[in-house]
Amino acid sequence: MNYNPITALLIFFGISLLLFFVFRPKKGIYSLLKNMYHQEDKMIIEDILKFLYHNQTSNKHITTNHLTSTLEFSNDIIVESLKTMLANELISLEKDSYKLTTAGSEYALQIIRAHRLWEKYLSEKTGFHKEEWHERAEKKEHELSQSEIDKLSNLLGHPKFDPHGDPIPTKKGKMVSSKGIPLSSLKEGDIGKIIHIEDKPDIIYKQILAENIYLYSTVRVIENNPKRIVFHSEGEQFILAPIVAGNITISLLEKDEIQEENIARLSSLKFEETAMIVGLSKECRGESRRRLLDLGFVKGAIVAIDLLNPLGDPKAYLIKGTSIALRKDQASKILINRN
Amino acid sequence: MNTKNIDDIIALSEELRWEIGDDFHDNLSESIYADASRIVEDAVTKDNKKSKFRLDARIDKIVTSRIWGFPIMLFILGAVLWLTIIGANYPSSMLASLLLDNIHPILKDFGTNLGFPWWLNGFLFDGVYLAVAWVIAVMLPPMAIFFPLFTLFEDFGYLPRVAFNMDNLFKRSGAHGKQALTMSMGFGCNAAGVVATRIIDSPRERLIAIITNNFSLCNGRWPTQILLATIFIGAVVPESYSSLASLSAVIGIAILGIFFMFFFSWALSKTVLKGEVSTFNLELPPYRPPVFWKTIYTSLIDRTLIVLWRAIVFAAPAGAVIWLISNVFIGDQSVASWLIDSFDDFGFLLGLNGVILLAYIVAIPANEIVIPTILMLTVMVTGISGGVGDGVMFELDSVTATADILRAGGWTLLTAINVMLFSLLHNPCSTTIYTIYKETNSLKWTVVATLLPVFAGFIITFLVAQLWRIFI
Amino acid sequence: MKNKPQSACETCAHFNADGLKKLGVKTGDFDFVVALAGNPNTGKSTVFNALTGLRQHTGNWPGKTVTRAEGAFEYNNEKFKLVDLPGTYSLLSTSEDEEVARDFILFGKPTVTVIVVDASRLERNLNLVLQILEITNNAVLCLNLIDEAERNNIKIDTRILAKDLGIPVVPTSARFQRGIPELIQTISELANGKIKCKPRKIKNIPKNIESSIQKLSKTIEKEYPNISNSRWIAFRLLEGDAQIIEALKTGKIASNEY
Ligand SMILES: Nc1nc2c(ncn2[C@@H]2O[C@H](COP(=O)(O)OP(=O)(O)OP(=O)(O)O)[C@@H](O)[C@H]2O)c(=O)[nH]1
Ligand SMILES: [Mg+2]
């Protein structure tokens, strides 16, 4: 073959393009093949169980049509799976709507347990972005065995809540119940604490994440009308559409429970201001939370900005006699009180 | 010891942990700090005279300022390199003439007088000795200048400020600011840089730092860059600018290395290393004036010892291998020329040649010996008489003589540029590979760290070669 | 150096300058093991060099030392093996960068632990000191960088500090060799049991945690009657430290000083 630089380049780009189409994430041929292989019966059955469980409380009648239109599997497979489940007495049929049996409901709880524990694990021990937790847990919940789930729970110290504030069922299927109301139903002047941020649907969850609203932070509603809800939390002001706010659950605080009014985030500290640390946000988790505590970012410590950065971030904070540089996303999880 | 009792203890601890809840660590840390501040109140008195002039703060304001922060860093890098390049010239040629021109003939005579057979004589003195001597002559002077200078900045406390300034860039590429520190260490020696990554407390960023450390041009590669830049790049511009041009070319390559480091950090963090934990914090210590002479002395002694050790352990066997493959014949072709022939086509595609690729394989133990290997093999292939002979590693005293040999071997400006690029982008030396394995404890990451830069090198030199041939 | 080092011991009977021999890397058959622990960048390696005559790398940034280094010195005919450790902020975490140091302090069985602290930043350094005192009964506080503290007008009453902490306190300035003779003297006396420590234990712990700790440490003591730091093990168990659980299961905890 005769050498020509242009042909050489063309061949090179041709091969690169081919590799790209095979291996690109999500839509690549390679990962499509991998996903196809994973569509197993177990997964479908478990997804149906979960779907029924979540709709149990709302007393909706779930028919085959409901299932085929919401679950992303082919209709034949779903119908097939329903038959197996009926035979195994996981579900029962009343007229045309499906109900969970006791066994089915226990099974569903175990999957929910696996899902929430895995989300907790992702939040504590890995660096995956919040956005990805749900999707990853959605896959993993079908892969964990009972003993793996127990081990996981042990490793995490048997947590009661997942990182969105949802209760994690225990091994025996017990769950802490938490009562809350949607943020959209709060009146002006109401004060409460965020106890849950719903991670479905994806579009709304991403909007909440983009705002940097943190779980377990205190909120005070400034304005609530059909167009928007304005509220303060940790010294920042947030504006949400009611439909978005509806996905945030609040537990109302009594007047004597309210202690934190002057709270702000360390990231909002200005040069030459000093402030006192009041604690770390619950969003600061795992190893990085421990490290911050070890470095002296504990309740009561006095903090000021020591150095600004030519590129804006990170900033160096003077704490207990030493200058320590932190990135903005970490500083925003340290709560301070300006005085 | 009773296992049941122990299981009971653990069960009890789990139960109690559940009762106490999440806040255990917070509470414990707070209690300890509360204790600490009570003790300090008792024992420490601080005389707070406000008028105190804080020199530290002044310096910090300047070296991290929006305007001066980055220029100062660039200036220091440039100055250190310039001093290294200029300062190493003279001792380097002195050592070369002493070890190669004077001692080498004496040793050979000595061997002949003792009645060594020709192959033993050649193997020992043309192979092993010359390799060691070359490494010492070329490596020792720049290291002996670079490291003490570096150590002075380190002792002063400037390095953490570099990490502080650059963190944002690292963050955007998914890496850790302290990687700036390990990257700087890598300019001296990649193996040292890889060990230094232990300061990075999050596993993901640590792996990124390990894998990309090789993009810091290490001391074993500086001399190659300097030599080629002087011969080929310096020659393109008018005489009076040539040293400036070659200095900028070398700095350019170093900065290109930094660019690749960022690029691959970013690519790794977005793909294979997705999801590993990441955190960042960096303590900025006060400035401390270095103990000047002591620092210079210590780091000089240390470096000399390390270079000598490497020369003996790695360069010596490599010298032996070079001598062997050039003097062992299959049919009427030496092993070396057979290998060169088979690499030649691939080499051409990359704008290199078979000699260069073979030299890089022989030089896996130590990057230092790439250029002498290339020279030796070129002489053998072209059959010109340039030095001592086949399979003998040697350094030509004058740069012009080296240039003549390389040109006779078919080198063009493109070859030189691509060798400079390939010297930046190829597998780490064997010490570094071994260190990476020890640090990561994983074959997978060692293989990735080894192959990633080679493939990057193939692709980049390939693209440069094609574009060059199309447009120039 | 402005004021020449004034060591009280130079005049006392115990101290003779000839008694010290720096042995470098010769760590064969020693009588005692001494660990150098402390926050990053407090001068541990500098102290190590001053005691052993070695040239362990030092540098003005936290994290210069990342591996364990060993050296030795001889004092009054007794051989001490000295171990320089990477800096740590805390023993309570499970982070990888602090693993080397944490492991040695917990499982390395040092006879004496020298805790090197930065005198100008005592409060933040005490965080680690108080944790180490939960683990060991034989420790000395090396109040290093005292020259910088003096320059910053910080005065430290070492007697009160020693009383509060329950361990001897030696002010040093390792870079200028100040206080090193006293440090050696103290290490030797601690090793030979001439000084007895009564290390301070962490106070101010919230009631519910304190009672859990006590409950747990009593159970541990029942199983391992000879253990001296059941409280620390209880802390770690409550944190769910896998390493400690492992050590408990294998009995490694009881087999040594731990
Ligand atoms: N002024 C002064 N400087 C000191 C003293 N002791 C150490 N230093 C300096 O402090 C810096 C840190 O010393 P190292 O010995 O490297 O500290 P280290 O504790 O080993 O640090 P890591 O290994 O990073 O944990 C160096 O620049 C030393 O020269 C001292 O007593 N006085
Ligand atoms: Mg050190």
Image (cartoon, coloured by chain):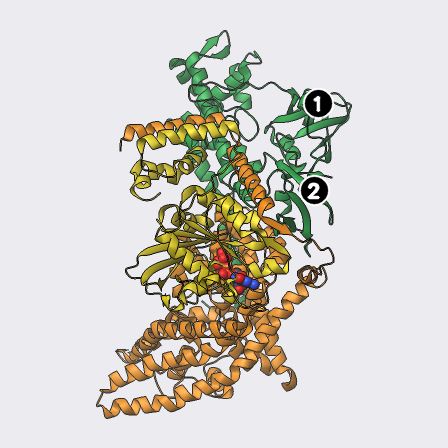
In the displayed structure image, the side of residue C59 where residue B435 appears, left or right: left
| Chain shown in orange | B
Which of the marked residues, 1 or 2, is nearer the chain's N terminus? 1
Q: Residue at x 42, y 46 (%)?
A: C197
Query: For chain C, what colour was chosen?
Result: yellow
Tag 2 residue: A275
Same chain for mark 1 and mark 2? The answer is yes
Q: Quadrant of residue A265?
A: top right
In the displayed structure image, the side of residue A206 where residue A221 appears, left or right: right
Residue nearest the viewer, comparing B234 with C186: C186
Q: Position of residue C95 (x, y in %)?
A: 47, 45
Query: For chain A, what colour was chosen?
Result: green
Tag 1 residue: A184
Task: Tell me the crowding category of disc 1: few under 14, some 14 to 19, or many 20 or more residues within 10 angstroms, Cα based.
Answer: many
Q: Disc 2 sits on a residue from what chain?
A: A
Residue nearest the viewer, comparing A187 with C222: C222
- Rendered position, A202 above or below B336: above
Mark 2: which amino acid? Ala
Q: Position of residue B335 (x, y in %)?
A: 31, 75
Mark 1: which amino acid? Ser
